Structure formats: C-alpha cells, structure tokens
Image: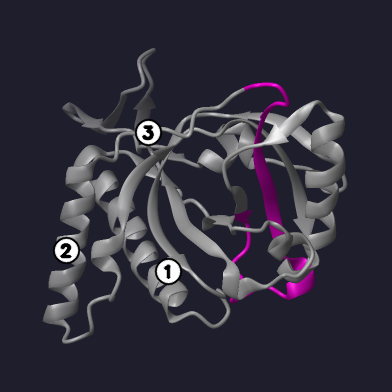
Amino acid sequence: MIEIHPANPREWHLVGTTPATFVFVEPRASKVDFKKTIAAYSARSGEFQIVDVPHLQYLMVDGSGDPNTSDSYTNALGALFPIAYTLKFASKQQQEKDYVVMPLEALWWAEDMDSFTVERDKSRWHWTVMIMVPDWIDHGMVEEAVGTIGKKCTSAKKPIPSRLEDVRLSDLSEGQSVQTLHLGPYDDEAGILAKMHEEFIPRSGLRMTGQHHEIYLNDVRRTEPSKLRTILRQPVVAAGEYVSTEG
C-alpha cells in the first residue's frame, strides 16, 4: 500500500496497483481536552494566582447539606455524570466532535463563610455541583440526553436517577479570580482558604464576590485522601468596585 498525503487534511490511500485504486479516508477527529486548552484549569500548589476565567457553560444541580451524608448530594452526582457522558457520545456521533468529559466541580456558599474556614459546619453549606461542557452543547441536546437515559433505565428495568430532571445547562462568568492547588484531604482546605480570604485577597486590593469554587482533578472513589488534587478558586473584584447582584 502506498499512502499519498496532499496538502489538505484529507488522506488518500492507494490500494492495489493493477489497476491503481485510490480510496478516500476521513481523518479521525481529534479529542479535545479542555483541561489542557483552558488556562484556568491549571494551578500551582503553595501559591495564589490571579487568573481570568472565561465565560463557560456547565451542567448543574443545586442542593444543600453535608455532602458526606446528604442523599441529595449523592443523587445529584448520580444524575450529573450519566448526562455528561451521554452528551459526550452524542457529540461524537452526531457532530463528529469528541472531547474528554471534564472533572466534577462545585460552587459552595453559606450565610456565614466561617462555616468553611473556621467551624467547617457542613450541614450549613449550600452547593451547586457541575461539569463543564463545550459551547456547542445546547439545551436540546441536554433534553435529548435526559430522555435517552430515562428510556435506557426503563428498558433495563433499572431506577431512573432521582434528580435527572433537576440537571440544567447554565452559563457562569467568573472573570478575575484567585486560585491555588490544594494537595490532600478536603477537610485540610480550611487553613488555605483562610489565608486566601483574609490575607492574599485584601492585600491584593481585591474583595470576594460570587461563590467559592472547587475543581476536583481526581476521582475521590479511587484516590487516597493524601493524593487528592483540588483547585480552590474565589472570584474577586477590585476592593472599591460595585458589582450588581441583579439578574
């Protein structure tokens, strides 16, 4: 076999010589890993960085309570991941656009932020768990994915994820943010967050806005607590800047 590669991305292969036959072969679509193409998904341990987070869209589910004991949190993840993977395969098959499913992320907040940095009272936490998806994913594709999962569960006589209908596609614009990479158990984050919130941010002439944001770069089910890698992010604005909270 003789392969001929012209200047354009297409490939033509010569199969046989008597007579010569050329067969057109479509090149394989490359798989995009947004963790490598979006700079905000990279952080360094032991230092705080000021980054500009682009406008992104996510699959999201809301809830409240201790993530270690809350059925709502477990059920949210049980709906989020099936939709994320169904969308990935639909994108590849229908649009010939393949990508790596992004890691789990979460927004966290409470009426008193000391429940994060001092008391660690998880029962008072509110959260939004989410997975970033490419901008070519639309609401119609999400609705189709929900329907597909429901039909598959019914056909296999398995329970439909209880929070499947709660998953939504929403945008998030965080913009200027402070972040760092935390290595180790989640419960060891408090000291780092205290330094970020109470020292680095005010010293940099900034103030916090929006919710505390975590990006989980490991699968907690398969990773020792000491080896967990988590990006800790806090959106900020200039200390004197007014930010409207109206929609």
Instruction: Give the total number of marks visible in the rendering.
Output: 3
Image mark for residue 247: 3
User: Residue 239, located in which quarter of the rendered image?
Assistant: top right
Mark toward the viewer: 2 or 1: 1
Q: Is residue 14 left or right of residue 111?
A: left
Q: Are marks 3 and 1 in contact (CB under 8 Å)?
A: no
Q: Is residue 63 left or right of residue 205?
A: left
Please say whether residue 221 is one of the residues in the magenta stretch. yes
Amino acid type at circle 1 is Leu
State which region is magenta.
215-241
Neighbour tally class for label 1: few under 14, some 14-19, many 20 plus, Cα within 10 Å:
many
Instruction: Give the alpha-carbon distance from disc 2 to disc 1, as whole Å.
Output: 17 Å
Answer with mark 3 or mark 2, whichever residue precedes in sequence. Answer: 2
Please say whether residue 223 is one of the residues in the magenta stretch. yes
Neighbour tally class for label 3: few under 14, some 14-19, many 20 plus, Cα within 10 Å:
few
User: Residue 172, located in which quarter of the rendered image?
Assistant: top left
Q: Residue furthest top?
A: 7
Answer with mark 3 or mark 1, whichever residue precedes in sequence. Answer: 1
Residue 37 screen position, x and y as percent:
56, 33
